[in-house]
Structure formats: structure tokens, C-alpha cells
Image (spheres, rainbow, N blue to C red):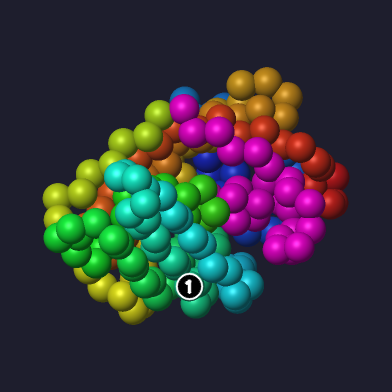
Amino acid sequence: MSAQIKDFNSRAQNETSNLIDLTLYREIAKERVQPEVAPTDRWVIHDNAKITCEFNVMPDRPVRENLYIKEYRIDNSYAEATFDRDYFSSMEKSPDHLIFLTAQVHTQKLLYLLLTKYFGFNYDANAKEHLKIWPTQVSVDMPKMVRDNENVVQKLWIHSVEAVKEGVFKVKLTSTFNDIVKITSETTVYLISKPENI
């Protein structure tokens, strides 16, 4: 691990983590390392979030899934969420399972929370957004279905953050659901406000 990466991980554990240092982000991307988790300053969030995904494949036969978030746990480059879920389908022989579309929607929410901390913002569910997230590549591996309705655990790791230009970053990540379903993604992130302490 390079000296710059060690310096970044050190800064991420104290007040200087609120400063966006593009050189450090470029170094992280170049080295392709996963920044270390620093749970000593973990955010634990209970915002009573409900995530809903509803669609239809055939006319007048809706499919709907709700995620009821119990808790978010946000570190500097790693995040977790625990949630319950329910499922409704008017399609034939459609078993209760985590829908990959809902998984992708909630991955964006979890990434938003993680990057809010990563870039030095404060989180307020009712405040204006700080970031815009635009996935450019998404891969979903679902070797079997997640059938649990209670205490599903999603994990998310940031692998790299590359500065494209001022206020624009390319982020690579992996997320899993109960260690079964896996999403890998590359996304462009736009900072649309400045961290509070800059």
C-alpha cells in the first residue's frame, strides 16, 4: 500500500476527511485498492426508509416489492443495510424473491449514503441532494434467489474513486445481498453541492 493511500486512510478517520483531495482519489484509482474500513466513526442511520419497486411485464399484472429499512451502517468506504421485504405478483408461478430491479434501486440509495460520508457531507433525509449518481455499467449475478423476508443484509464496497474533472468522479463498487446476489457497477458521480466544512 502506497504512502498516499495510507495517508488517505488516516485522513478518513479524522476531521480532514472533509477535504476533497483529488490527488489522493487519483492514487486510489491507480492502485486499485479497497480503502480500509474505519468503524470507529461509523454512521448508524434510522431514517424509516421504504423502497418500492413496481412494474408489469404483462398488461394489468403488476409486480411489486417493498423494502423496509431497519438500519444503515456507513463507514468510510464500506456500508451495510438491514431490511425486511414483502413481495406481490399477479403473474403465474412467481415465487416471493428479491427482485434484481429493487436490488439495483437500493444499491443506489446505499451508495448515496456512503458517498455522502466519503465526500464529507452530512446526511439529512429531508435535505437537498448532494450528489447525482449515474450508473454506466451494471452487472447482476443471481445464482439463486434471495427468499428471506426478514433481516436481509446488503453490503457495499467502494473499490476505487477516480477524479474525472472537478466535481466529477468515476466510482467502482460491488454489493451483495445475503452473500448470494451480487451487483458490480461503475458509476459517474457528480457533486452538486460542497461539503459543509470546506
Residues rendered magenta in the picture: 111-136
Answer whether residue 25 is visible to the viewer in this image.
no
The residue to which callout 1 is attached is 68
Q: Residues within 10 Å of mark 1 (few under 14, many from 20)?
A: some
Image side of residue 145 versus residue 187, left or right: left
In front: 2, or 23?
A: 23
SS of the residue at dot 1? Answer: strand
- Whole-percent x and y of residue 168? 66, 28
- Whole-percent x and y of residue 31? 43, 30
Residue 75: within the magenta?
Answer: no
In front: 149, or 34?
A: 149
Quarter of the rendering occupied by the C terminus: top right
Image side of residue 173 versus residue 27, left or right: left
Answer whether residue 109 is visible to the viewer in this image.
yes
Q: Which quarter of the picture shows residue 67?
A: bottom left
At x 55%, y 33%, the residue is 134
- Whole-percent x and y of residue 4? 57, 36
| Amino acid type of the residue tagged 1 in the rendering | Tyr
Q: Which quarter of the picture shows residue 63?
A: bottom left
At x 61%, y 34%, the residue is 189
- Whole-percent x and y of residue 42? 58, 68
